[in-house]
Image (tube, helix red, strand yellow):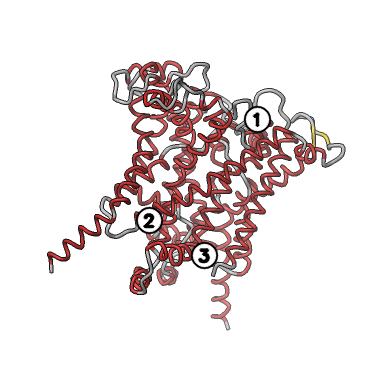
Amino acid sequence: MNRKKKEMNITAKQQAAGWAFLTPATLLLVIMSFYPIIQAFIMALKTGSSANMQWCEPITYNFTRMFSDKLFMRSVVNTFLYLLIEVPIMLVLAILLAQLLNNKDLKFKGFFRTCVFLPCATSLVSYALIFKSLFATEGLINSILVKVGILSENFNFLGTTYTAKAIIIIALIWRWTGYNMVFFLAGLQNIEYSVYEAAKIDGASGWKTFWHITVPLLKPTIVMTMIMSINGTLQLFDESVNLTKGGPANSTITMSHYIYNSSFGEGTTNFGYAAAMSFFIFILVAVLAFINMKVGDTRD
Amino acid sequence: MTKTKRTNGSAIQKRLIPSYIFLSIVSFISVFPFYWMITAATNTTVEVARGKITFGSHALENFRNLTAGQDLWGSLGNSFKYSIAQTIVALFICSLAGYGFELYHDKYKDRVFSILLLAMMVPQVATMIPLFRMMSKMKLLNTVWAFMLPAISTPFLIMMFRQNSRNFPVDILEAARIDGLNEFKIFFKMYMPVMKSTYAAAAVITFMNAWNSYMWPKVVMTDNRAQTMPMLIANVANGYTIDYGLLMTGVLFCSVPTMIVFFVLQKQFAEGITGSVK
């Protein structure tokens, strides 16, 4: 009896220790993530300067306002454009590269992998500025194109709406393909080689093997990288700020960039309205995460 | 036998030629911007604009111009200070939590864990304004605390440590308890050494993220003396006319630390990226 009591005491102590271990991280997440998102929602219902904020009239004013705000709508369209073009190209490229690098007969594997992975070693600001310089009117790409004769005179890539958008997409693909490839390489290494041997014996072609064996087995990885990429693209900021400054004339601005400008940029700032717009991104990301969980549930 | 094997081998290599070509092109595209950045840092802006892609002799001049206009050493020091502090504290707090969630798990802790994971859904830009006001109210602007507090506890790291804690042998835990070690000593003396490789991977990814972060420091580091390297190079690029040689010298200084980490700890970096997925 006494012994049992002592044992219970020990378990209780251990349980208490368990709680103690996870308390700092939990508290920090509550204070730095959950509490601010609630505050952001409350702030989104208010208007006025940061020192003197009052409830909106009507209360949903900031939320309805954003849908008639042409600039915000443009930033939404831009962000989705980047997303719809960049994510598929990048993921297909990443799978292809991973597949090529997973071939056991391939030589210089480590070298190729390091090269493809290297862009991840730059900060987002660094690579944005490198691309900005490469594509500048007096930049390297222009001087090559003029020398080769494709262009007759230097072209202002970053000052023209369509090319500026294209360059953001190219830059994103450059920076993130290797990053995603790492996931696919890890995923491919988990596939037993015997599966491929069996397919070979059954006479399946390389393409068929890829489509009917590799892709289904990689599905969880594909879903995950897709979710991560969408999540990241929805929050795109550094590239828009440093590569194009959102320009020309705000035509390449992203949602996060516009929210930043509305809250900390030059000129008039409006915390309430910015908070409402940021809540819009939050809802997009949350819906996405929800879909992710649904898809994730059925994958086994 | 050996002969057929060899011919087989060369036949396979022949079939791989398209792969080699494709991989070489992709590798070139991936590496060239780095090469160009380094050469540009050694050339004058006029040479860069003319399309020179070989090394020049103006590296020192670019460096002098950069340090004359910008507080390079201050920003570099700040970036190191903030990133190292964030890495140490984040690893400690998150590994404690991952360990607690995995090895002491029960119904309630699992529930707390699944609530914490919801934080993954919260985009940075949505908490930026309330957090800025919080930091400013607590007079933490321009301090390392403002830089790292929102980034110390992340669902990603907690999950990474929790997943990897599954490999931690529970027998050791029991044996240590019988030896009379208390729960905290077990964590420091048993868990931490055994989990070295997880700590390494987590450290690399956390350091990289901290070094590269831009939006949040831009919000809370309002004083020039507190600015980070990404902020410094963004400032250089904001001028009316851009001196490309000078700019690329700055970009080089901003990239060298992460590139060293990348080359020395590439395996850990890859593990860190895929960290919580197992």
**Residue drawn at (27%, 59%), measured in percent from left and top?**
A105
Residue pointed to by mark 3: B102
Dot 2: chain letter: B
Residue pointed to by mark 2: B197
The image shows residue B89 at horizontal and vertical percentages of 49, 46
Horizontally, residue B274 falls left or right of residue A282, namely left
Q: Is mark 2 on a helix, strand or loop?
A: helix
Q: What element carries label 1?
A: helix
The image shows residue A79 at horizontal and vertical percentages of 61, 40
Dot 3: chain letter: B
| Disc number placed over residue B203 in the picture, else none | none
Mark 1 surroundings: few (<14), some (14-19) or many (≥20) residues within 10 A: some
B271 lies above or below A70: below
Q: Nearer the viewer, residue A82 or B98?
A: A82
Horizontally, residue A52 falls left or right of residue A78, namely right
A111 lies above or below B219: below
Residue pointed to by mark 1: A261
Q: Which of A49 and B135 is in front in this view?
A: A49
Q: Is mark 3 on a helix, strand or loop?
A: helix
What residue type is disc 3 on? Glu
What residue type is disc 1 on? Asn
Instruction: Identify the image quadrant of the N terminus of chain A.
Output: bottom right
The image shows residue B218 at horizontal and vertical percentages of 57, 31
Q: What residue occupies the far bottom of the structure in this picture?
A: A1
Q: In which quarter of the view is residue A236 placed? A: top right
